[in-house]
DNA sequence: CCACTGACTGGAC
DNA sequence: AGTCCAGCCAGTG
Protein backbone atom coordinates (compact mmCIF):
# COMPACT_ATOMS: atom_id res chain seq x y z
CA UNK A 1 0.00 0.00 0.00
CA UNK A 2 1.47 3.29 -1.04
CA UNK A 3 1.15 5.95 1.60
CA UNK A 4 3.25 9.04 1.25
CA UNK A 5 4.73 10.09 4.53
CA UNK A 6 5.99 13.37 5.84
CA UNK A 7 8.96 14.36 7.88
CA UNK A 8 8.35 15.58 11.38
CA UNK A 9 11.72 16.93 12.35
CA UNK A 10 11.43 20.06 14.39
CA UNK A 11 8.34 18.97 16.26
CA UNK A 12 8.60 20.50 19.73
CA UNK A 13 9.44 17.86 22.33
CA UNK A 14 9.87 15.30 19.62
CA UNK A 15 13.20 15.95 17.94
CA UNK A 16 13.98 13.61 15.13
CA UNK A 17 17.54 12.38 15.05
CA UNK A 18 17.67 11.67 11.36
CA UNK A 19 16.15 14.62 9.52
CA UNK A 20 16.01 12.71 6.27
CA UNK A 21 14.09 9.78 7.67
CA UNK A 22 10.45 9.79 6.60
CA UNK A 23 8.11 10.29 9.51
CA UNK A 24 6.23 7.06 9.40
CA UNK A 25 5.34 7.77 12.99
CA UNK A 26 3.51 10.95 12.07
CA UNK A 27 1.49 9.30 9.36
CA UNK A 28 0.65 6.35 11.56
CA UNK A 29 -0.34 8.54 14.50
CA UNK A 30 -2.62 10.62 12.31
CA UNK A 31 -4.26 7.58 10.76
CA UNK A 32 -4.76 6.04 14.18
CA UNK A 33 -6.57 9.14 15.42
CA UNK A 34 -8.71 9.57 12.34
CA UNK A 35 -9.75 5.95 12.63
CA UNK A 36 -11.14 6.65 16.10
CA UNK A 37 -13.71 9.22 14.95
CA UNK A 38 -17.12 7.57 15.32
CA UNK A 39 -19.62 7.41 12.50
CA UNK A 40 -21.71 10.57 12.35
CA UNK A 41 -19.12 12.60 14.24
CA UNK A 42 -16.62 15.22 13.08
CA UNK A 43 -13.15 16.29 14.00
CA UNK A 44 -10.77 18.99 12.81
CA UNK A 45 -7.24 18.97 11.47
CA UNK A 46 -6.05 20.75 14.60
CA UNK A 47 -7.72 18.25 16.91
CA UNK A 48 -6.24 15.32 15.08
CA UNK A 49 -2.80 16.89 15.16
CA UNK A 50 -3.02 17.45 18.90
CA UNK A 51 -4.30 13.98 19.69
CA UNK A 52 -1.68 12.42 17.50
CA UNK A 53 0.95 14.17 19.56
CA UNK A 54 1.88 16.90 17.10
CA UNK A 55 0.18 20.08 18.25
CA UNK A 56 0.34 22.91 15.78
CA UNK A 57 0.65 20.71 12.72
CA UNK A 58 -2.80 20.75 11.16
CA UNK A 59 -1.41 21.39 7.72
CA UNK A 60 0.63 18.25 7.87
CA UNK A 61 -2.49 16.36 8.85
CA UNK A 62 -4.07 17.64 5.67
CA UNK A 63 -1.08 16.54 3.65
CA UNK A 64 -1.26 13.09 5.18
CA UNK A 65 -4.95 12.71 4.41
CA UNK A 66 -4.40 13.92 0.89
CA UNK A 67 -1.82 11.19 0.45
CA UNK A 68 -4.17 8.40 1.49
CA UNK A 69 -4.56 5.68 -1.11
CA UNK A 70 -7.73 5.55 -3.17
CA UNK A 71 -9.42 2.68 -1.40
CA UNK A 72 -8.51 3.65 2.14
CA UNK A 73 -10.97 2.52 4.80
CA UNK A 74 -10.04 5.49 6.95
CA UNK A 75 -12.98 7.83 7.67
CA UNK A 76 -11.06 10.80 6.29
CA UNK A 77 -14.29 12.57 5.40
CA UNK A 78 -15.03 13.14 9.09
CA UNK A 79 -12.17 15.61 9.26
CA UNK A 80 -13.15 19.18 8.45
CA UNK A 81 -11.54 22.52 9.19
CA UNK A 82 -12.00 24.42 12.42
CA UNK A 83 -14.21 27.01 10.74
CA UNK A 84 -16.89 24.41 10.18
CA UNK A 85 -16.79 23.61 6.52
CA UNK A 86 -15.40 21.09 4.11
CA UNK A 87 -12.07 22.43 2.88
CA UNK A 88 -11.81 23.13 -0.82
CA UNK A 89 -8.29 24.39 -1.13
CA UNK A 90 -6.30 22.43 -3.62
CA UNK A 91 -9.03 19.94 -4.33
CA UNK A 92 -11.66 19.46 -6.98
CA UNK A 93 -13.95 16.47 -6.75
CA UNK A 94 -12.82 15.36 -3.31
CA UNK A 95 -15.03 18.07 -1.88
CA UNK A 96 -18.23 16.72 -3.39
CA UNK A 97 -17.27 13.22 -2.37
CA UNK A 98 -16.70 14.33 1.21
CA UNK A 99 -20.04 16.12 1.33
CA UNK A 100 -21.75 13.04 -0.02
CA UNK A 101 -20.16 10.76 2.56
CA UNK A 102 -21.05 13.09 5.42
CA UNK A 103 -24.67 13.36 4.36
CA UNK A 104 -24.82 9.61 4.17
CA UNK A 105 -23.92 9.55 7.86
CA UNK A 106 -26.70 11.95 8.71
CA UNK A 107 -24.69 15.14 8.96
CA UNK A 108 -26.37 18.14 7.36
CA UNK A 109 -24.05 19.83 4.90
CA UNK A 110 -25.11 22.61 2.56
CA UNK A 111 -23.91 22.78 -1.01
CA UNK A 112 -21.09 25.10 -0.03
CA UNK A 113 -19.77 22.53 2.41
CA UNK A 114 -20.85 24.33 5.55
CA UNK A 115 -21.97 22.23 8.50
CA UNK A 116 -22.69 22.44 12.21
CA UNK A 117 -19.32 21.61 13.68
CA UNK A 118 -20.28 22.38 17.27
CA UNK A 119 -23.12 19.90 17.06
CA UNK A 120 -21.11 17.01 15.69
CA UNK A 121 -17.59 17.70 16.92
CA UNK A 122 -16.19 14.67 18.64
CA UNK A 123 -13.97 14.57 21.69
CA UNK A 124 -12.40 11.31 22.75
CA UNK A 125 -13.12 10.11 26.22
C1' DC B 1 18.68 29.15 -3.37
C1' DC B 2 14.25 31.55 -3.70
C1' DA B 3 9.23 31.78 -4.23
C1' DC B 4 5.06 29.83 -3.96
C1' DT B 5 1.57 26.47 -2.98
C1' DG B 6 -1.08 23.51 -0.28
C1' DA B 7 -7.37 19.06 2.59
C1' DC B 8 -4.86 24.64 8.64
C1' DT B 9 -5.04 27.32 13.02
C1' DG B 10 -5.05 30.76 16.67
C1' DG B 11 -4.30 35.23 17.91
C1' DA B 12 -4.13 40.17 16.87
C1' DC B 13 -6.55 44.06 15.43
C1' DA C 1 -17.32 39.61 12.05
C1' DG C 2 -13.88 40.07 8.83
C1' DT C 3 -9.14 40.21 7.59
C1' DC C 4 -4.35 39.67 8.32
C1' DC C 5 -0.44 37.21 9.67
C1' DA C 6 3.03 34.13 11.58
C1' DG C 7 3.94 29.42 12.12
C1' DC C 8 3.96 25.28 9.76
C1' DC C 9 6.95 22.08 6.24
C1' DA C 10 7.06 18.97 2.02
C1' DG C 11 6.88 19.54 -2.97
C1' DT C 12 7.56 21.83 -7.13
C1' DG C 13 9.67 24.78 -10.56
Image: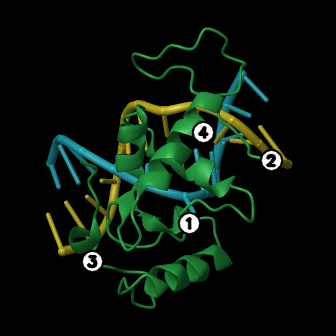
Chain colours: A green, B cyan, C yellow
Residue that label 2 marks: A2
- Indicate which disc residue A89 carries: 1
x and y percentages locating residue A69 in the rendered image: 74, 57
Q: Residues within 10 Å of mark 4 (few under 14, many from 20)?
A: many
Is disc 2 surrounded by few (<14), some (14 to 19) or many (20+) residues within 10 Å? few
Q: Are marks 1 and 2 on the same chain?
A: yes
Q: Chain of mark 4?
A: A
Which one is earlier in the sequence, the residue at label 4 or at label 3? 4
- State the separation of the CA atoms marked 1 and 4: 21 Å
To the question of a shared chain for discs 4 and 3, the answer is: yes
C-alpha span from label 1 to label 2: 23 Å
State whether discs 1 and 4 lie on one chain.
yes
What kind of element bears circle 3? loop
**Horizontal placement of A88 versus A40: left or right?**
right
Number of numbered discs: 4
**Measured along the vertical axis of the image, is residue A27 above or below residue C3?**
above
Residue A89 image point, x, y percent = 56, 66
Q: Are marks 2 and 3 in contact (CB under 8 Å)?
A: no
Q: Visible in this render: residue A7?
A: no
Q: Are marks 1 and 4 in contact (CB under 8 Å)?
A: no
Crowd class of label 3 (few under 14; some 14 to 19; many from 20; radius 10 Å): some
The residue that appears at 22% across and 73% down in the rendered structure is: A119
Residue at 73% x, 43% y is A4
- Residue A82 visible in the picture: yes
Between A50 and A92, the one nearer to me in the picture? A50
In whole angstroms, how far apart are the C-alphas of marks 2 and 3? 34 Å
Q: Are marks 1 and 2 in contact (CB under 8 Å)?
A: no
Q: Quadrant of residue A111?
A: bottom left
Amino acid sequence: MLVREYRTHGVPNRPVKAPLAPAAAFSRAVQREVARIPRGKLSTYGDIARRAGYPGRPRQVGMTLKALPEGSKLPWHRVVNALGYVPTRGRWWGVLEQIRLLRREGIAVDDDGRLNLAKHRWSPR
